[in-house]
Image: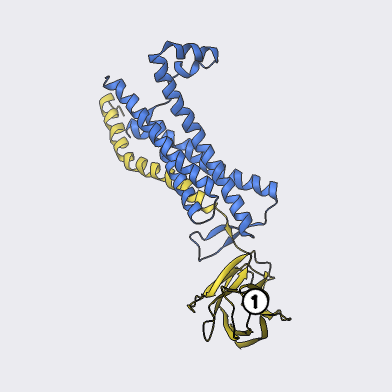
Chain colours: A yellow, B blue
Amino acid sequence: MYISRNKRQQIFSSVGRFLEPFGLGLLCLLFIIPALTFSNLTPLAKKLNDNVLGVQDETGFEVEMVGGNHNVFQNEHLIKQEENLYKYDTKVVSHSTGNYSKPILLLTNLSSATNEITFKGSTEIPIGSRIGLIYEDRFYELQDSLGEMTTQKISVEGTETINVFLSVESFGDVQFGETFFMDISFN
Amino acid sequence: MSNLLKKALRFSLVPAILIIASKVIGVLVLNSVYDLDISIGNDLGQAFSTQIYISSEKDALLLNSFTDAFTLAAISIPLLYMIIKVFVQKQSQKDPRTVVKLTKANLLKWVTKEDVSFLKIFIWTAFLWMVSALIIVNTINGNSYLTIGVVAGVLVLISTWGVLRVFEIDSNKVYPE
C-alpha cells in the first residue's frame, strides 16, 4: 500500500501530538522518582529487632532507686503505684546557698525502641529554690523558685540504662526542710 | 512531540540518574567504610512501606549528612561548571585577553564548543532546587548536619542567580542590546 509523503508527515505529526502528554508525564516522573528515591534512601534511626520469631519485645521502663546518704536529700522513697507510674519522694533538709545534686534513679528502657519517660514534681510549699533533674549535663527544671511546676520528658534509647540526678539550686539559705514529691510515668 | 520537550527529557535523564546513583553509592560506601548496622525493614507507620533502618541515631546522622553532601556535590559541581563555562564564553566574545588566557591554560575548547544551553542549565538548576529542598528539610528534622543545609541554601541562591544571568546572556543573542 502506497502512502504519500504528505500523508506520512501527517501521521507522524498526529502520533507526536498523541505522545506529547506522555512526554510531559515522563518529564514529571524524571523529577519525582529521584526525589522519592532520595527520601526513601535516607535511613531512619531505629533499634534493630534482634528478637527470635515468637519472642515478644518487652515494653516500659525498669525504675530503680540509687539510694545512699546525702546532706541535703534524705529519707528517699520509690513506690510503684501502677504498671507505668512510679512515685518518688525525698526530704530536702535545710541548707545554705548553693547547688546540690545526687544520683537518685536508674532507668532502663526495656523495649528495643527509643521511648520517653515523663517527670512531674514539686514540694508542697515553695522553698525559693529551683528543683529539677540533671541528665547528660542538662538541667530539666521541675519547679522554679516561685513554685511553678513544669513537666519534663527524657528520651531514652532502646535497652539503654540512664542515671538521673536530682538537683536543687538555692539562691539563699533554706531554713526549713520540705518533702519533694515526683511522679515518674511512661507509656 | 515538540523539540523542546524532547530536549528537556534528554537533559533531565543525567541529573535524575546522578541523584539516585550518588545517594545509593554514598550509602554503600559509608556502610562499608564505617561498618554501620543497617537493615531494610517494613514499617506501616512510615511514609514508605520499605525503608532503610540504622541502629543508632548518631550513625543515621552521619550517614544522612555524608550522602546528602555527595548528592549535593554530584548535582552542583556540573551545574556550576556549566554556568562558569557560559560566562567564560560570553567574556571571551567581549575580551580577547580571555581567549589568550584560555589558550595558555589549554582550555580553548571551552569557548569553541557550545554544548551548554539555557534549557540544560535550567533543568539542572531545577534538580538542584529539588535536592536542596530535601536536604534543608532533612536538616530541619535533625537528620543532617546544619552546615550541609546551609551550603545547600547558598548553592540554591548562587545557581538561581547564575541561571538568571545565563537567561540574560541567551536573550541578548536574540535581542542584542
Residue wearing tag 1: A58
Q: Quadrant of the C terminus of chain B?
A: top left
Q: What percent of the width, then of the height, locates residue B84?
A: 45, 26
Q: Is residue A181 left or right of residue A148?
A: right
Q: Residue A127: x, y in percent?
A: 54, 81
From this view, report whether residue B140 is shown above or below residue B155.
Answer: below
Give the residue at x 65% y 66%.
A49
Mark 1: which amino acid?
A: Glu
Give the residue displayed 54% in from the left and 12% down from the top. Answer: B104
- Rate crowding at label 1 as few (under 14), some (14 to 19) or many (20 or more) other CA atoms within 10 Å: few
Residue A109 seen from this side: no
Residue drawn where x is 54% and y is 72% of the image:
A141
Say left or right for B34 vs B152.
Answer: right
Does dot 1 land on a helix, a strand or a loop? loop
User: Quick one: A38 or A125, which is closer to the camera?
Assistant: A125
User: Total marks drawn?
Assistant: 1
Q: Chain of mark 1?
A: A
Classify residue A65 by image quadrant: bottom right
Q: Nearer the viewer, residue B85 or B41?
A: B85
Residue B74 percent across, percent down from the top left: 53, 37
Q: Is residue B36 left or right of residue B177?
A: right
Is residue B30 among the parts visible in the rendering?
yes
The location of residue A179, given as percent across then percent down, is 59, 86
**B146 versus A53 height, above or below:** above
Work out which quarter of the rendered image holds the N terminus of chain B and state it.
top left
